[in-house]
Image (cartoon, grey):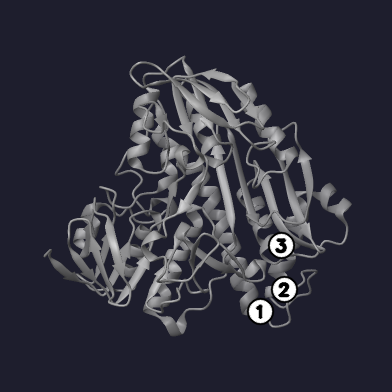
Amino acid sequence: MGEEKSFEYVIVGGGVAAGYAALEFYRRKVGSGKLCIISDEPVAPYERPALSKGYLLPEAPSRLPAFHTCVGANEEKLTPKWYKEHGIELILGTRVKSADLKKKSLITSVGETITYKYLIIATGARALKLEEFGVRGSDAENVCYLRNLSDADKMVKVMETCKNKNGVVIGGGYIGMECSAALIINEIKCTMVFPEKHCMARLFTPKIAEYYENYYRNKGVKFVKGNVLSSFENDSTGKVTAVVLKDGTQIPCDIVVVGIGIRANTSLFEGQLAMEKGGIKVNSRMQTSDSDVFAVGDVAAFPVKLFGNDVRRLEHVDSARKTARHAVAAIMEADKTTDLDYLPFFYSRVFALSWQFYGDNSGDPIHFGDYSSTRFGAYWVDQGKLVGAFLEGGTRDEYSAIAKAVQWRVKVADLSELEKLGVDFAIRESQKVVKESSGASTGVVMKKEVYGWHATAGVVVAVSVAAFAYWYGIRRKRW
């Protein structure tokens, strides 16, 4: 029988959320020896976004320990030494093979039994594999995914052999766009293949997508839209030499990067916890159907106040950070912890471009700005209220303004005015929000039960999100 260990708090998973949860536990004075993190990765938690950015640069690439959590939020860098000094046990390179929540016990792949008082599930998500769609060949030496450090190391190694050769990226989402940029920067010709009508189809409007696709074309990227991978052509060693599409088209290649989505890692807890939206269902304190178990990050499906408490599973690093901290607060100070009021936002930086999105892309999109320049954007209006905003090339104050305007779902009476004013509309309305929090009149529509201190808190959240995103967009170039 394996060794048995007991902790008051256990975090399963070693991604971004685990690092931010650990820092929050430390700040709340958790004693030495009371917290344990179990991770199947061989390194301490790190900022995963670095893998598709600075890690893939051909010159001065980022490497650990430079991007351990929590540098992504301009906070402490939690190296293995930090965990040791603060009495937090890291069990790395170890998978949890079974969990018995009734007994509050976990069994690891090496036979250890870990018991806990409170459990935080931060298992994240895994990259979807081609085999799940009936395509074989993911194990070829030049087929790459990008989800963890091992994946990134493989991609770097393959790219080093492909200068001036051909690359194919399967998928037109976040990973597809960022990895295509990486191939171009590494002087590899790139063709993107995806089934949708345009890139970033879950977020971009056709007009926004057209801008980025044209920008990428000018960088040398080719697009094959409305098509999917069917099979590979391989040489005698098994290396992929061409991708074969559903319509029979063959594209020669020396490297293939696959980014076709992710799936939450819930298998350990299925049948033991309530599930929703492909993840583990939690309340506004990140608490699961088992009151001593919490779920955070990509694996958690939680109610978003901004959307009328509709349950969402948000696959983004900011959500991982915020939900992790909130879960720890709810565990440590349950009586003082309010419901999470999260402002969803997404951002990306490729080549010389940098955009941010806040809220939800539901309702009617209203585009503004000059789409022949690098400063433009869009709002989304639903039932007369602003529910989402996108901005390319904004300043810190402009991002802050659109965040606040979305946070308070400002009323939109004239769509033509919204289009004409563009970001100035958000600046004007966000100033009204600030005045309202000080007791002045405003055009912002709020529910009657929302009082001044709630308004102030909402503004602080929106501003801090925007400020962090602006800082992070600049800093992560170096990662």
In the rendered view, tell whether residue 402 sits above or below residue 292.
above
Q: In the rendered structure, are the residues bearing label 1 and label 2 in contact, judged by CB atoms less than 8 Å apart?
A: yes
Given contact means CB atoms under 8 Å apart, are the residues at marks 2 and 3 in contact?
no
Task: Quickly name the residue at label 1.
Answer: 452
Locate the C terminus by quadrant.
top left
Kind of residue at badge 3 = Ser
Q: Residue at x 47, y 31 (%)?
A: 257
How many angstroms separate mark 2 from mark 3 (CA)? 10 Å
Given residues 262 and 283, the one toward you in this image is 262
Q: CA distance from mark 1 to mark 3?
A: 15 Å
Q: Is residue 349 above or below residue 378?
A: above
Q: Is residue 323 visible?
A: yes
Question: Where residue 367 sits: x, y (%)?
Answer: 78, 45
The first of marks 1 and 3 along the sequence is 3
Instruction: Name which residue type carries label 1.
Output: Gly
- Residue 124 shown left or right of residue 368 in the figure: left
Read off the residue under disc 3. 430
> How far apart are the two marked residues, 1 and 2, measured between alpha carbons?
7 Å
| Element assignment for label 2 | helix
Which is more N-terminal, label 3 or label 2?
Answer: 3
The residue at the far front in this view is 134
Give the amino acid at mark 2.
Glu
Could you say which quadrant of the image residue 431 lies in? bottom right
Give the mark nearer the N terminus: 1 vs 2: 2
- Dot 1 alpha-carbon crowd within 10 angstroms: few under 14, some 14 to 19, many 20 or more: few
Identify the residue position indicated by label 2 in the image: 436
Image height of 19 relative to 347, above or below:
below
Judged from the image, the secondary structure of the residue bearing numbered disc 3 is helix
Q: In the rendered image, is residue 60 in sight?
A: no
The mark found on residue 55 in the picture is none
Q: Please rate how many residues cluster around mark 3, counting C-alpha atoms within 10 Å: few if below 14, some from 14 to 19, many from 20.
A: many
Q: In terms of secondary structure, where does tag 1 sit?
A: helix
